[in-house]
Amino acid sequence: MSDIDIRITGRAGRITLTRNKALNALSYDMCMAVDAALKAWADNDAVDLVVMDAEGEKAFCAGGDIAELYQTGTSGDYDYGRRFWRDEYRMNARIFEYPKPVVSFLQGFVMGGGVGLGCHGTHRIVGDSTKIAMPEVGIGLIPDVGGTLMLALAPGRLGEYLGLTGARMSAADAIYAGFADHYIPEARWPELIAELEQSGRADQLVDAAEIAPEGRLEALRDTIDHSFSGETLGPILTTLDQDSSAFAEETLKTLRRNAPLSMACTVELLHRLRLGTMGIRKALELEYRFTHRAMEKGDLLEGIRAQIIDKDRQPKWQYADRDVPATAVSQMLMPLATQTLQFEEENT
């Protein structure tokens, strides 16, 4: 497949995204190729670890390929998207639960589906160009691919802030928020990958790690915790609206562009995960409740239209006044009964 290069080199299973002209956006076929390789390598004694990287300087993976979702969804075919998400989420869980080390080198943009691919492994390496974000609410989706678990586990209310604004994290920010493990200058990555392939051991990554250039999230922590302390979207917006600071003004400007229903559901998902027993499968199952309904009952098709089809940046959201009823959130997140996300291991 020209979009992805999967092979075994030395002691390492190697996955390289090669769709750099499209910022390595994940297609359904790419997801399935990754999943098949991980399954094959799990019991292969010749493979000691998995190493993921990507061609190009701009992005490890800037997200999922959403153009096809729009084409199928606008024709009334919701099954393609549901199958994509269902199978992608199974792949995300496989990475999170993998029995061998999974090392990812995350340059440039790492967004949406790229987070699901690159940020669930055991050794997540970031550099000076890294920009990690979960900006899905901007197109009428929610942070998914297991992103809600990472957001729920982030310190304080950083999860709400990152999930509702789609703010981009630098290397230091990503490490602080729990999306990455080690900062290593990108010039060293080729030699480190070669060492990983030869040795099959990830120990040297800890020794190679350096202190990342200072980020911004840690210094904003108290402000973020105060601003995003509300239990639902409404109180968060009210707190920001009553704050005359530059932070509140800029944050509100961002939130006013995003889909209100998606933001309200994101807050609810993070709170549900924190209240229960947090785990990757629970997070993905809750996320799938939303994505299963996203085209038919949510704002996803309108968000994609405004963002990448017509590019008018003028989406007509449901609940444009940002007063999202609790019933609307409940309807998007209620159990799916027979359509509940199942994981392959449970079906065999």
Image: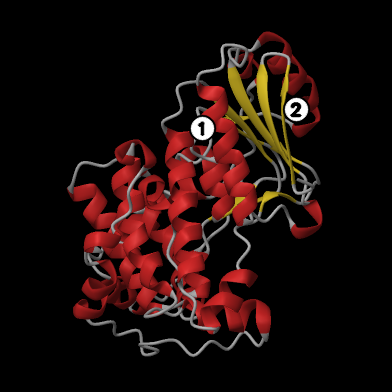
Q: Quadrant of the N terminus?
A: top right
- The reply to whether residue 260 is in sight is yes
Q: Which residue is mark 1?
A: 121
202 in relation to 336, above or below: above
Pick the front one: 256 or 109: 109
Q: Could you tell me which secondary element the residue under label 2 belongs to?
A: helix
Pointer 1 or 2: first along the chain: 1
Pick the front one: 74 or 199: 74
Residue type at numbered disc 2: Trp
Instruction: Give how far across and how far down residue 288 sits, in percent.
Output: 36, 59
Residue beneath the point at 41% across and 31% down: 97
Q: Which residue is mark 2?
A: 189
Measure the alpha-carbon separation of dots 1 and 2: 17 Å
Residue beneath the point at 55% across and 31% down: 38
Instruction: Give how far across and how far down residue 62 sits, in percent.
Output: 65, 56
Residue beneath the point at 79% across and 20% down: 191
- The reply to whether residue 172 is in sight is no
305 in relation to 159, above or below: below
Other residues around mark 1 within 10 Å, as few (<14) / some (14–19) / many (≥20) = many
Furthest toward the top, the residue is: 199
Other residues around mark 2 within 10 Å, as few (<14) / some (14–19) / many (≥20) = some
Q: Quadrant of the C terminus?
A: top left
Judged left or right of residue 244, residue 14 is: right
Instruction: Give how far across and how far down residue 155 sits, in percent.
Output: 36, 44
Q: Could you tell me which secondary element the residue under label 1 belongs to?
A: loop
For discs 1 and 2, the disc positioned in front in the rendered view: 1
